Image (cartoon, rainbow, N blue to C red):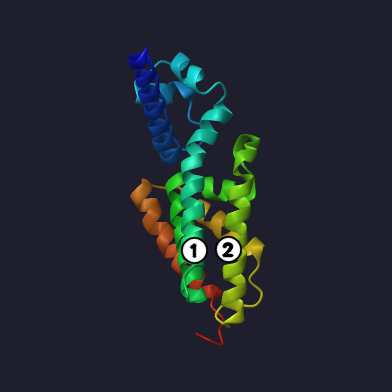
Amino acid sequence: MGDLRRDAQLNRERILAAARVLFAERDLQVPTSEIAQRAGVGAATIYRRFPTRDALVAAVFTTRVDECVSRILEASRDSDPWRGFSAAIQALCTVDADGRGLTRDFLSAVPGGASEFDDQRRVAEQAFADLVRRAKEAGALRAEFGRDDLTLVLAANAGLVQGDVAARRAASKKLAGYLVAGFRNPATS
């Protein structure tokens, strides 16, 4: 019985790894049959572990959510609010490029209505809002920067869909650099 559980756990891990790679390479609409083939399991095995496509997306999404929240919290602890703000924008764009829009989805609406991410989203949004407030108070960030501007950043970043993950990361880093420079308060530049 222990071997079956171990085998089932290994299958689950292989399915998640394959789904992460395929979602990053293409998008969330990758056919389940391709995920099964990449994982080396049958489609029925996927449905035993993840009864719906939304359950599979939510399981893959968990890793990205954790990374996204972690990066925002890390940036928000920087004693220099401008440096923290810049790091947060760079990190979010990189995570988003790696996951082909999963960060954008997390910060706007959770795929499949998976409400287990609501608390994490609130933590991330609050940490980013505090960082924005501190950067504005320090005079480093344009006064007109608002929550919708983060959505705009991630929408622009989502346009970087060409190439492999490394190419998307490089383009994302460049875009984030340009955007951060544009967000800087001209009086402090």
**Circle 1: residue type:** Ala
Q: Residue at x 46, y 20 (%)?
A: 46
Work out how far the residue at label 2 is from the one at label 1, CA to CA, in angstroms: 8 Å
Q: Which residue is mark 1?
A: 88
SS for dot 2: helix
Residue at 48% x, 65% y is 75
Nearest the eye: 76 or 21:
76
**Residue 184: image x %, image y %?**
53, 77
Which quarter shows the N terminus? top left
Image position of 158 with respect to 54: above or below:
below
Up-down relation of residue 44 to residue 167 (above or below): above
Q: Amino acid at mark 2?
A: Phe
How crowded pointer 2 is (Cα within 10 Å; few <14, some 14-19, many 20+) is rated as many
Vertical position of residue 161 compared to residue 143: above or below:
above
Mark 1 packing: few (<14 Cα in 10 Å), some, or many (20+)?
many
Query: Where residue 118 appears, x then y in whole percent?
Result: 64, 46
Q: Quadrant of residue 33?
A: top left
View extreme (front): residue: 2
Count of all numbered marks drawn on residues in the image: 2
Q: Does the residue at mark 2 contact the one at mark 1 (Cβ under 8 Å)? A: yes
Q: x, y (%) of residue 165?
A: 37, 47
Percent across and percent down for residue 23 are 45, 37
Q: Which mark is residue 128?
A: 2
Q: Which of the two residues, 172 or 72, is positioned nearer the viewer here?
A: 72
Residue at x-position 57% and y-position 54%: 155
**Residue at left offset 47%, top offset 14%:** 44
